[in-house]
Image (spheres, coloured by chain):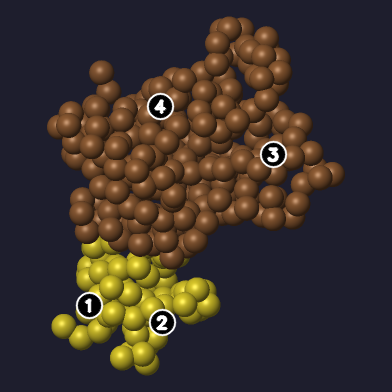
Amino acid sequence: MNIEERVKAIISEQLEVPLDSLTAETTFEEIDADSLDIVELVMALEEEFDLEISDQEIENIKTIGDIVNYIESRI
Amino acid sequence: MWRLDQKVALITGASRGIGRAAALALSRAGAAVVINYHRSCDAAEQLLGEIEVSGGRGLIVQGNVALYEDCERMVRLSLEHFHKIDILINNAGINRDNLLIRMKPEEWREVVEVNLTGMFNATRAALRPMLKQKSGGRIINIASIAGIYGNSGQANYAAAKGGVIAFTRSLAKELGSRGITVNAVAPGFIETEMTAALPAALREQALKNIPLARFGKPEDVAEIILFLAAAGSYITGEVICVDGGMML
């Protein structure tokens, strides 16, 4: 699995949304993720990719593509 | 009555007083208890002995809740040993009573750091595993009636305990959607080492103001802690006074 697929799999599991409904352009607003959902998601991503995502970075994340780009730039 | 089989409870300041009574009550209900203490090592070991003799499970973890790294270690050891945390009881507390005009800045600071910041530290450290477990949870904070009504000579203690109540209500709102309830228990005059140190005249005066005509026992408070831990699934952000009617 590439990074985008791994991220989507985690989001699908964490937020209980169907995997095939997620694209790089999907925003967290569209999938009804609240601020605590995003924190939980970040926790799961940190574990999966073994990195730390700062609070400041979290604020810049709007779409699934944003997360993928961020993780790709870090590993 | 209320059961907590297969549940794991982390109790700060558990070696003496209300924390100790809570550890015994939760253990009797079937929970594995993590006993945190700061200085009373012997008391903690005695408590664990008592729990194990009655067939319960426990773990002792030394640590100062005023230090975030100690709380992180406490949580890590709890997870290593029992693999989860279902219940957090923020009980560790101290008092440094003094009239404000005589209160030293360090008396203010110490009380706020243990009673209020300590609660933040332990909760912050325990919250990540609790959220990840996705099985809800219970956070029970020990406040005080001083935190609601104030008390002469306890401006530091009352301010910290008032903060505990505001923290409780805010966190109840934050975590409700995850099935984690957050409540506070506000004891009145409870017979512990903390109140034993008070002057006799003050104790007598306090007793006159208690409709139930006795001081509370740590077990009276532990019973309500157990209730909030094992039942009360539709109660959150609440403060339950256990004061014998003292403030009526």
Which secondary structure lies at badge 3? loop
User: Is residue B38 visible from the viewing direction of this image?
Assistant: yes
Single out the mark in the foreground, 1 or 4: 4
Toward which corner of the image does residue B21 lie, by quadrant?
top left
Name the subunit of mark 4.
Answer: B
Specify the amino acid type for callout 4.
Answer: Ala
Q: Which mark is residue A66?
A: 2
Which secondary structure lies at badge 1? helix
Above or below for B107 versus B97? below
Q: Residue at x 34, y 85 (%)?
A: A71
**CB contact under 8 Å: marks 1 and 3:** no
Specify the amino acid type for callout 2.
Answer: Asp
Quadrant the N terminus of chain A occupies: bottom left
Residue B138: x %, y % from top left: 37, 40
Q: Colour of chain A?
A: yellow
How far apart are labels 3 and 4 at the CA level?
24 Å
Colour brown maps to chain: B
**CB contact under 8 Å: marks 3 and 4:** no
Name the subunit of mark 1.
Answer: A
How far apart are labels 2 and 3 at the CA level?
53 Å
Same chain for the residues at labels 2 and 3, yes or no?
Answer: no
Residue B127: x %, y % from top left: 39, 55
Residue at mark 4: B222
Residue B230: x %, y % from top left: 31, 30
